Image: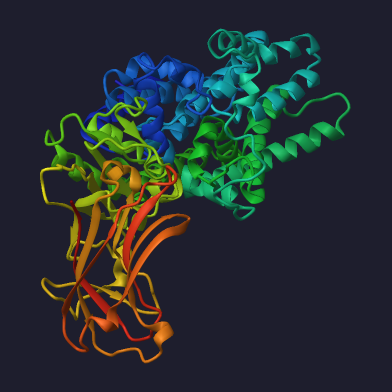
Amino acid sequence: MPLKQDRLPFVFICIYFAAMCALAFLTNGTGDEGDSVSHYLFAKYAFKHTANFLDHWAKPMYVLIAAPFTQLGFVGVKLMNIGLSTLSAWFSYKIAKIFALPNAVIALLFVMLAPMHIYLTLSGLTEPLFAFWLIAAVFMAVRGQVTASVIWVSFLPFVRSEGLVILCVYFLYLLSIKKWRLLPLLFAGHVVFSIVGYFYLGSFWWVFTDIPYAQNSSIYGSGQLFHFINGLKNVLGLPMYILLGAGLVYGAIKLYQTLKSVSYRFITATELWLVYGCFLAYILAHTLFWYLGIFKSFGLLRVLVGVVPLAAIICLRGLNILSDLWGNKIIAKKGFVTTVVALVFAFTLFGQNWKTHLLLRADQVAQMEMANYIGNRFEGYKYYFDAPFIAMALNVDMFDQDKKEFTAELFKNKPIPDKSLIIWDDWYSVMECQTKLEMITQDSRFDLLRSFEAGDQWGNHRKTYLFKKKQFTFNNNNAETTLFTTSFEQQPTADSIRIDSLHAFEGKFSAIVSNAAPYSLGFDLPMSEIANATGKILHAEAQILINQNEPNQYKQPIMVISFENEKSYNWTPINLQDLVPEGRWQKVSFETTIPAAQTLKDHVKVYVYNPSSFPVYLDDLIISINK
């Protein structure tokens, strides 16, 4: 028996929901390795850290809605977004029906088949909730429930900050339909959260002052003017991108006709302002933010998912206007529509690298390998890391500063527990915390345990390094306590310019020092780590090789023990050419008394300085404290 036309939307809804739920359980991807995971973690720990419910970056409405779902794990937030996306598709269909658009059910398919909408639904991002919230508001207005729509949309800025842009469109919409009395309701969401925030944060104005994007600059720079306009092709797929263009032309024509006409509207105010207006305002806002480099815009195309349900209605307008070119040829029109839908489906199914979109990304694979390596080996350790996914992989409460801090905190002269693990990643540590790998590798407080890497689709090797805090303990009964040893065998690639593989006293590598990099790798330790060693002897020894002596006495290499806070206040050098015969390895040692630290920022350093063009090689460096 043929399927009744009015049942077709329910069939598509059921197929989509079942397929997406299957993907939620069968794939391990997070849609995005940064914000997706961070939003999930904010919601997951909100019941424990209640400030998360009012965090302006995490978005209060998102945290409030997502918190119960996240207790099921990451799959819980995927299921939440699947439900929201299903409703978004349904509302797009219902709006098309109310507008009496032919082929209204296809609006539903367009939402379901937008490629980026699919894989970001399987994430912890806020875009699916924003898309649902916005299309639900438009649906209410289209049904004539304008008051409910205005109150509902007033909370949109607490789903995503772009909601402020949508409120501006609603302001113009209410003026155009002469419903001025509803204008104050646009502030309902802000009033509610201002009152709630006052009792928790002590300020009514936090809804404005705490907006994290309210800056006229961005650390991410700026980009091309048409970045987001061109990027819609990646969000919707090429066939829908073309239909969107046709739909926008349709809207422009109807607007022109309406403006020319005195007594007839060729397009309703609701469709003009809330479908076309909200869509275009959203695109224009992000275009300007990125082009001007303001409001911390990063040019991420994923933000466009927030208007996919609106785009689906515009695409349907485009499809219908193109099908009308066939005139009264019913069979030809149906064939055209069927062909276009088939192309949309084929492009979505076969035009994407779904493995990349639905599975863990390369940096996450490396971090999962690291988490498996850690296992239960380091019970009771504190973590220092920056990538959000690491918190998820290790099941660490990232909001508990007794358990986790950012790597930037390592360099603020704060005490670091002896039982600490430091995890450096090649994106978040560098971009978000400005922690370069060499800052950790050249810090004598930390030992490199292991590195982890995985290749991505572009041929890059994403890397994560695991370090352990050294424990500096002194026993007055011992004649000597070793602080530090290195044979330079495990230096990361960041230090490759100062590592040599042709000369080594033992092993495969040594440190090379020349005027290209005149300061060697060496020993660098905050004085606070050896505060109880004041008055004792700091002893340094190393194997040194000089193949050719420097004749200029002012450029001859030296080895130094330096106690300093920005500038050295206790400096003990030795001239290496006085001690090392030319052309062979020689053990060199010297020592000095450890002075009292002058400030909390004091460091002790041991290194070779060589301004000469003739290289010096350093191996088997040992630093110890003697009675």
Residue 182 against residue 319 in the figure, above or below: above
Between 533 and 422, the one nearer to me in the picture: 533
The image quadrant that residue 560 belongs to is bottom left
Between 550 and 306, the one nearer to me in the picture: 550
Residue 77 % position (x, y): 34, 24
* Quarter occupied by the N terminus: top left
The image quadrant that residue 575 belongs to is bottom left
Q: Residue at left 69%, top 37%?
A: 251
Residue 549 % position (x, y): 30, 89
Say if residue 579 shows up in the picture: yes
Q: Residue at left 39%, top 17%?
A: 49
* Residue furthest out toward the right: 262
Looking at the image, residue 567 sits to the left or right of residue 119; the answer is right
Say if residue 361 shows up in the picture: no
Q: Residue at left 61%, top 8%?
A: 195
Residue 382 % position (x, y): 26, 33
Residue 67 % position (x, y): 38, 17
Looking at the image, residue 61 sits to the left or right of residue 359; the answer is right
The scheme the figure's colours follow is rainbow
Between 42 and 475, the one nearer to me in the picture: 475
Between 42 and 94, the one nearer to me in the picture: 42
